[in-house]
Image (cartoon, grey):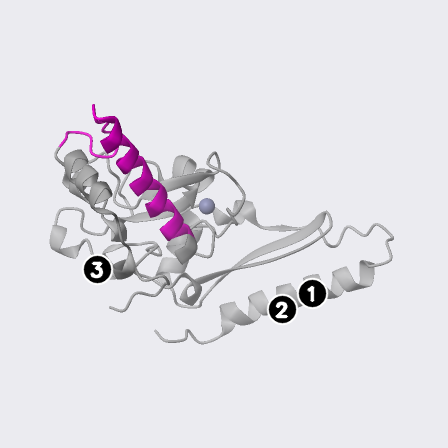
Amino acid sequence: MPDPYLPALEDFELSEDEATAIQSALASDDPWGWISENQHENDALKSAKAKILGFHLSRHGGNCCYCRVNLNGAGPYMTDREHILPKGKPVYKPLSYTMWNLAAACKRCNMQFKRSGDAFVVDPDDPSLFQDSANYRFIHPNFDAYGEHLVRFQAQVDTKDIVIFSKASGSAKATYTYDFFALHELQVDSFDRGQGRQIENLETDLAARVRELAKQFGQGPRSRL
Ligand SMILES: [Zn+2]
């Protein structure tokens, strides 16, 4: 299946030192949390992890891979390196540094909803299915094109904003993702609270346009599927 995002996963590159440090980490009991006694190796691992995060963030335009909140400038306290198949389960440990199993997510999605479970995996016991989009109930951050299933419509003017998630009709992954990450909690529409300001008509027009676009996406045919 072609990679739905850019830069493509196959173009990810590590330095020799970074790759060696990852091999050492993978040989340990706790590959992601492993700390080397060698400072140089630790630095290389740290640098590899930073590269992984930056690469995945850019694949999703700087947004969380699950809820699409923008993480640019949000800093390290908002952004998590996300292991899609959780690194805590023995069968998934060898995938701790595998690029297709990594992504960048916001703390809310990762800590509150994704956590360490794997209920979103259809068959968690057959490693030959781990790279199959159909084996994931939600929109996979690397195997599925998010925008073909779910779109976050958002506009902000000064202190007013509107956020609407629109699901492509017939997409089971859209529904699962929306429910799993409780995306309804993120929907807001504060544009109707008029404050008698000069730009109020423009604000109302913009909000109406966003609502209309979200509705159109939800009703339209699913493209390329
Ligand atoms: Zn999120």
| Outermost top residue | 37
Residues at circles 1 and 2 in contact by the CB criterion of under 8 Å: yes
Quarter holding the C terminus is bottom left
Q: Earlier in the sequence, mark 2 or mark 3?
A: 3
Q: Which mark is residue 208?
A: 1
Is residue 96 visible in this depiction of the protein? no
Q: Which residue is nearer to you in this view: 37 or 87?
A: 37
Instruction: Check residue 84 for magenta coloring.
Output: no
Question: x%, y% of residue 124?
Answer: 18, 47
- Please indicate whether residue 100 sits to the left or right of residue 158 in the image: left
Q: Nearer the viewer, mark 2 or mark 3?
A: 3
Q: Which mark is residue 132?
A: 3
Q: Secondary structure at mark 2?
A: helix
Q: Amino acid at mark 2?
A: Glu
Location of mark 2 (residue): 212
Which stretch is magenta? 28-57
Question: x%, y% of residue 195?
Answer: 84, 50
Q: Amino acid at mark 3?
A: Asp
Instruction: Check residue 52 for magenta coloring.
Output: yes
Identified at 29% across, 46% down, the residue is 84
Q: Amino acid at mark 1?
A: Ala
Identified at 26% across, 27% down, the residue is 39
Q: Secondary structure at mark 1?
A: helix
Identified at 28% across, 55% down, the residue is 12
Quarter holding the N terminus is bottom left
